[in-house]
Amino acid sequence: MVSNITETFILLNYLIAITLSIVVALLLKLPFVPEKPIRFSWTKSALFPTPIFAIGILAIFYSVNFYWFYDGIILAVIIAILSGLFVKYLFDYVFPKPNTGEYNE
Amino acid sequence: MNEIIGVILASIISWINFVVIDTYFGLPEAPGVKGANIVGDSIKNRGGNLSGGFFQGNILCSPDASAGTLLASMGVMVLGFQGGLIAAFMVYIGNRLCADPGYAGTIGALTTTVIIFSCSFLGFTHIMFVIGMVIAITTIQGLNHSYSSKLLGLIAKKLNRETKLE
């Protein structure tokens, strides 16, 4: 754990996490953007929500001053890869689409 | 910067931020859940605008850019830049739990984080944006529903996001 990391380095780690999570999601054959109209689309894609998971979880670790090895880069890489895997394989189980069909009252 | 002037300017910035993002992401177009439909119809029956009513119903029923703006301001106040990113992540989870795709809330939280970070160089403090957002949301939800829904309906019309439902 390192405590004297500069803000520039932290910003760089976030950029690494964003870029790598998008790359991992694309390698796992997720679409780059949701289908149009995007504002009503429920499709998971490389651009949304994969980087949101990566930077959100990374921010939780950094906010408690947990950086691990190499000024937090290793943590950023691991979280980016796990975010891509999560969105591809576990997302629908954790956040299922709402049932928009008929329901019994 | 003078606190009062700062709060007024922060209210205006927050108001524009959340109204434009929520409108752009289609909140006035359709009610996402049944509750938003009921709010929209109720506001229309009281002399308001249906598009504005759906907007108000949607921000009431799920954390859209309004909640994203408020939570990101609070996150930045508590944890700095990283608090805003955590807020965006939490707002996204909240959105999915409320049967909402989550674009408006998450992007609203991220833009707010960037705005607060940029405005801090101009002398704005984080607390100004927290108060500013509370004032901004009060002007929409807390003063007069029929007038505010008409204003929101007008903005929706300008951005081509008016509802096609009757």
Image: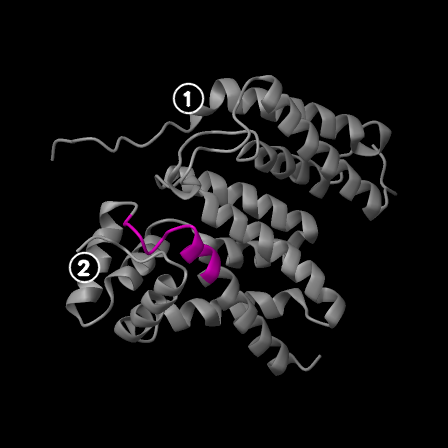
* Amino acid type of the residue tagged 2 in the rendering: Asp
Residue that appears at 73% across and 38% down: A15
Q: What crowding class fits label 2: few (fewer than 14 Cα within 10 Å), some (14-19), or many (20 or more)?
A: some
**Residue B135, percent from left and from top:** 47, 72
Secondary structure found at label 2: helix
Secondary structure found at label 1: helix
Task: Give the answer, above or below, for where A89 lies relative to B141.
Answer: above
Range of the magenta residues? Answer: B20-31
Q: Which residue is mark 1?
A: A93
Is B143 included in the stretch rendered in magenta? no
* Amino acid type of the residue tagged 1 in the rendering: Tyr
**Chain to which the residue tagged by mark 1 belongs:** A
Residue that appears at 40% across and 73% down: B139
Q: What crowding class fits label 1: few (fewer than 14 Cα within 10 Å), some (14-19), or many (20 or more)?
A: few
**Residue B1, percent from left and from top:** 71, 79
Task: Give the answer, above or below, for where A2 lies relative to A26.
Answer: below
What colouring method underlies this structural image? one colour
Quadrant where the C terminus of chain A sits is: top left
- The residue lying toward the viewer, choosing from B51 and A61, is B51
Is B27 included in the stretch rendered in magenta? yes
Q: Taking A100 as reference, is A78 left or right?
A: right
Q: Which residue is mark 2?
A: B41
Q: Taking B24 as reference, is B78 left or right?
A: right
